[in-house]
Amino acid sequence: MTRLESMQAAIGLSERKTRHKGYPAASRSFDLIALALAAWVLLGGYVDGIAHVNGATDDTFFTPFHLLLYTGMLAKGIFLAGMQLRNVSRGHSWLQALPRGYLTSLVGIAMMATSGFLDFLWHTAFGIEADIEASVSPPHLLLALSALVFMSGPLRALWGRAGAQRGWAQLFPAIASALLVYSIFSLFTQFAHAISWVELYTAAGAPGSLFVWDHALTARVIIPAILMNAILLLLLRRWPLPFGAVTFLLLGNSILMFLLRSAGYGGDNWWVLLAPLVAGLIGDLLLHGLQRSRIAALPLRVFAFLLPFSYYVAFFVILQLTGGIWWSIHMWTGVSVLAGAFGLGLSYVVVPPPLPAEAAAAPEREP
């Protein structure tokens, strides 16, 4: 080595760049920052949703609600892109410059930026969506897909990490990320959530024609029941959840969904928020017993049935005690059982029945 090369090496000016194989090490601080920025975007989405649902938008794209949403997206993009460039400069390849699972989140940010521009063009051409239109507008659905891709970053990252992960200290980023994903699905199906349309079930909200309303209000129980079980059974497929995780997910999501429309009718029925608290505690107690040993199929199916069943029984009982509901006992008890039945059905996707020995040993048939 020449004297000049020695001097360059000593002060870090060597032209040779050390290449790093694999991904940069993950850190809790990285997970938490990514989670906080994703929560910022979710908050913007819900604030914008509240504006659409309650008719607070005007005929323009440039609203304070969009500002909160898109500044969150910008902050998330700057964070991930900055870390990407920094780690590339340190010798990581472009495809492995972020901790495992987060490159997909960066792609999601790019998708959201593109979707936001398409949303601007859509609003310019067709005007601002009102009420349910905001949930099914094509550019808004692209925004939802983009949000799911980048908000699931901490969940995706922890899912792929080796080693035992237990307790709130290790699993909080994954559980909170699951809440964000759950809440995006809920936001874009808000037209079919009982917790967002409480006044339709109360005695004061009795409709004139029962046929259509019975169908619509039944769907507002079954769809969220499927969502709550889907996210929880997914998490249980990977980790033993800490006590309080079920309550955290159900109550956090229910508060957001309740607030989505509460401004439109005064939020008088806030007592129904005790329903996710009751169901969450029941779910946590059931899981505490299940997870003391390896989760077996039968106890898991009991959990999958009782969680949505207890949620909606508590929901309707609370309404009965705080003002009454116009639905007959046949309807509100029946749809609660239906909610549990759909939850039970989902458990067979996560833990299917074992194959008989001869079927397990049989070679696969040619297509």
Image: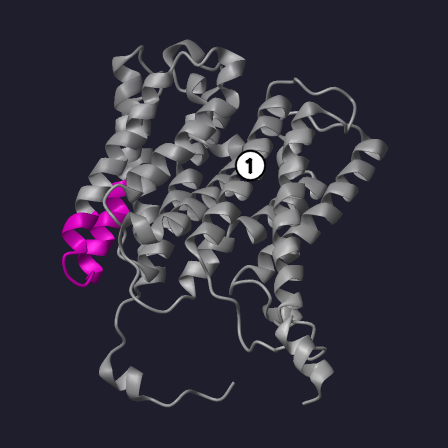
Q: Residue at x 29, y 88 (%)?
A: 361
Residue 306, image x, y percentages: 24, 42
Q: Residue at x 31, y 56 (%)?
A: 236
Q: Residue at x 59, y 70 (%)?
A: 96
Does residue 90 appear left or right of residue 288 in this picture?
Answer: right
Residue 234, image x, y percentages: 38, 56
The relative height of residue 209 versus residue 170 in the rendered view (above or below) is above
Nearest to the observer: residue 163 or residue 354: 163
Give the residue furthest to the front.
Answer: 3
Q: Residue at x 67, y 40 (%)?
A: 140
Dividing the picture into quadrants, the one containing residue 300 is bottom left
Task: Determine if the magenta segment contains residue 306.
Answer: yes
Residue 44, image x, y percentages: 59, 32
What are the residue bounds of the magenta stretch?
287-307
User: Which residue does the numbered mark 1 point to in the structure image?
Assistant: 40
Give the residue furthest to the right.
Answer: 125
